[in-house]
Amino acid sequence: EPEVTQTPSHQVTQMGQEVILRCVPISNHLYFYWYRQILGQKVEFLVSFYNNEISEKSEIFDDQFSVERPDGSNFTLKIRSTKLEDSAMYFCASSEAGFGLARLGTQYFGPGTRLLVL
Amino acid sequence: GQNIDQPTEMTATEGAIVQINCTYQTSGFNGLFWYQQHAGEAPTFLSYNVLDGLEEKGRFSSFLSRSKGYSYLLLKELQMKDSASYLCAVRATGGGNKLTFGTGTQLKVEL
């Protein structure tokens, strides 16, 4: 069964450094997402992406964050200057469609990247 | 905005049935999703409801009442491996298919 994959599984960085988290969505999916989950807290939406554009972003997704689809398979999240409070599990997700039939909009999550900012 | 409420914890016995409730308030409703999340792992899709009623999928069923802003996930024939957090998530109309998650219900299945 097709899966979303993410690399790396763990990343440790110093405050102020840039990090890039990578994701390979399910191959026939057209909509891509990033969510984060701070330890012990709920999953929070960051951004959705379709047709090489951001469809929607949350207030968390400020100028320090950016997303890119650099080629036909990868989807990346860049944090330009990491802060201590960026420490979290970051999940990539993808769906066939973005709206309409709920079945097509069902989001499938990758295993996550655990980011620790020191 | 959206607000989603779930019980924080529940305990049930292996082989039994458990019902996990979720209530929500949203400005525009376009589907409710249930995910299972084991500690340190990704949310795994279980079921969705867009229309009122019960959707059955093996040992798992999910119910929705849009007029009441209420859903539940029913797990039958509980197994030890069902011990996990169960996340209720609401999709709103418009925009980029964003899911808003509740805090999750931590289910513990005991012998």
Image (cartoon, rainbow, N blue to C red):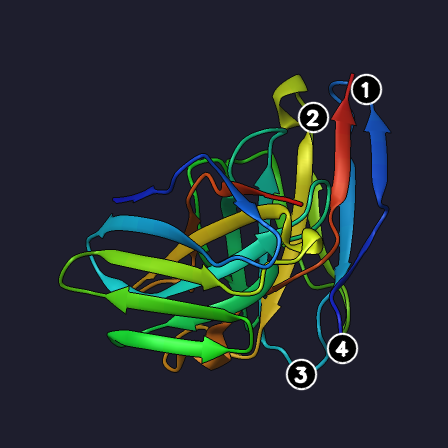
* Residue at 37% across, 42% down: B6
Label 2 crowd bin: few (<14), some (14–19), many (20+), radius 10 Å? many
Q: Which mark is residue A14?
A: 1
Q: The numbered mark 2 sits on a residue in which chain? A: A
Residue type at tag 1: Gln
In which quadrant is the N terminus of chain B drawn?
A: top left
* Disc 3 to disc 4: CB gap under 8 Å: yes
Q: Is residue A9 above or below residue B45?
A: above
Q: Which residue is mark 4?
A: A2
Residue type at tag 4: Pro
Horizontal arrangement in the rendering, residue B55 relative to residue A93 (left or right): left
Q: Is residue A27 above or below residue A7?
A: below
Q: Is residue B106 above or below residue B58?
A: above
* Disc 3 to disc 1: CB gap under 8 Å: no
Same chain assignment for discs 4 and 1 = yes
Label 1 crowd bin: few (<14), some (14–19), many (20+), radius 10 Å? some
Q: For the residues marked 2 and 1, what is the alpha-carbon distance in whole angstroms?
A: 8 Å
Same chain assignment for discs 2 and 1 = yes
> Which of disc 4 and disc 2 is earlier in sequence?
4
Q: For the residues marked 3 and 1, what is the alpha-carbon distance in whole angstroms?
A: 36 Å
Disc 3 on helix, strand or loop? loop
